Amino acid sequence: MNPDPDICYEALLARDRRFDGWFFVGVSSTGIYCRSVCAVRSPKRRNCHFFGNAAAAEKAGFRPCLRCRPELAPGHGVLDVSSRLAQAAALRIEEGFLNHATIAQLAARIGVSERHLRRIFSAEFGVCPIDFAQTQRLLLAKRLLTETPLPITTVALTAGFGSVRRFNAVFLQRYGLNPRHLRVRTDARPAETMTFALGYRPPLAWSALLDFLAQRRIDGVETIDHTSYARTLELTHDGRDVAGWLRVTHAPARYAVDVTLPASLAPVVGPVLARVRRLLDLSANPDLVDAQLGSLAAGHPGMRVPGAFDGFEIIVRAIVGQQISVVNARGILARMAQRFGIQVGAAPQALRTTFPRAAVFAGLTPDALQACGITRMRAQALIAVAREVSAGRIMPEPLAPLVETLAALRRIPGMGAWTVQYIAMRALAWPNAFPEGDAVLKRQLGCTSAAALRQHASQWEPWRAYATLHLWRQHEEARASCKPIG
């Protein structure tokens, strides 16, 4: 990415939050790089150098600002970069993929050769994948040092460094500081929880986002109130399963959400925060989306398309929810979690079990799933897709190869067009996904056929998924207004 210096400097002077995370400014007079919204006195134009990402700024020799903290900046949305392949690789790196794998394995994961990956990554980000990964490790370590009392050894290993010695050396070389200089609570007792901020570009329709998730919550797995979202989770780390929980609350004054985790999840902080960001669509650029949607977005500017903490869970939700009410679907999903999930100890009240992963579903029989309340055809579809996901032939995650992934889903009996588009919208984070056969959308827009609906929705491309959320919400608001009082 090559940001236009004049536009960037104007945004820097205005501290325009729409540009937060789109570029970073390195100041030659201080040797420090900052976010566009940094509160320090604006530097002179001749001292400013602009970079598309933090890794490029650090490669040029700049150190991160301790005041605006570049690690807190929102990320790039799915359509914000020219190469989806490079962005897919960057997303995997941000989740820690290269902490336990090679560049060749990363290239295989996104379906290209190692040579091609290096070429497109360098063209897109201005650095090689290894340098990008090193920056991500350092920024995560900086967060852990600043925001938690975790021991230095734990910080080093959690961030992806092989040893404390290596961590100290790289930190000193890159930032000119001993890591202990950032330790603000050296004498603090180990805390039971940790809280991290994730920034976003305003506006954020937080209440609408919570409403969407609350209507579809899985009892025992999720709990939502007027201010927060909480859920259980399960990840694999160093070959073993790690289960726990998280809670997210809104911090509008800081244009951020706060993510609270138990201290036991320290080894997987990086992947968890990355998944929360995509679950809440925090990397969206609402001014672009809302401008395209026009009057449709006027009632709830900053609407997000809720993603997935785990893409396979969205697949299960989509299949179970076919042609039944949301209430009935929630009951079936809760029974699945209770019977096949992992019990989570020491979790807040109402959070009891994780949602079963693909490998669990792959080993079940249709009879076992039918006992939860679904038809045999849907049980067979769930098992079939679970086996594909477990084997790595289908990857329900953002920036997975879109055409190939959707085609693989369609080949599974019982996976119709609506189901596949819903998965594309929430699991694959495809902003132009559109469930054109959806009865609610037809009713809201007065369309009698899928073709007419598709034609009407063309005005909202490439943000049809966001339009879908607005139309669904309008439908729910209309229904609520028609309910009798008392």
Image: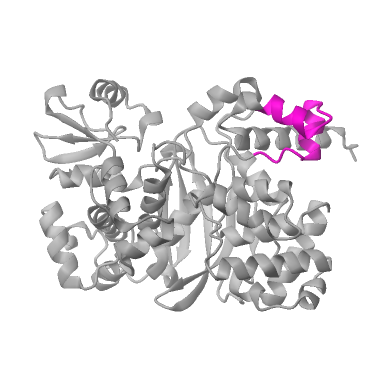
Q: Is residue 355 visible?
A: no
Residue 333: name its quadrant: bottom right
In the picture, the quarter occupied by the C terminus is: top right
State whether residue 162 is above or below residue 140. below
Check residue 439 for magenta coloring.
Answer: yes
Which residue is pictured at 72% across the width and 47% down the height? 417
Check residue 277 for magenta coloring.
Answer: no
Which residue is pictured at 29% across the width and 71% down the height? 157
Q: How would you classify the magenta stretch by its main secondary structure?
A: helix
Q: Is residue 199 visible?
A: yes
Magenta extent: 434-457
State whether residue 53 is above or below residue 157. above
Q: Is residue 382 left or right of residue 233?
A: right
Residue 306 percent location from the top left of the image: 59, 46
Residue 49: name its quadrant: top left
Residue 20 percent location from the top left of the image: 36, 35
Which residue is pictured at 67% across the width and 36% down the height? 468
In the picture, the quarter occupied by the N terminus is: top left
Of 82 and 238, which appears nearest the observer? Answer: 82
Which residue is pictured at 45% across the width and 40% down the height? 77
Q: Is residue 139 left or right of residue 423?
A: left
Q: Is residue 51 left or right of residue 483?
A: left
Residue 360 percent location from the top left of the image: 63, 75
Of 437 and 340, which appears nearest the observer? Answer: 437
State whether residue 391 is above or below residue 126. below
Q: How is the image coloured?
A: one colour
Residue 373 percent location from the top left of the image: 83, 68
Of 186 and 10, which appears nearest the observer? Answer: 10
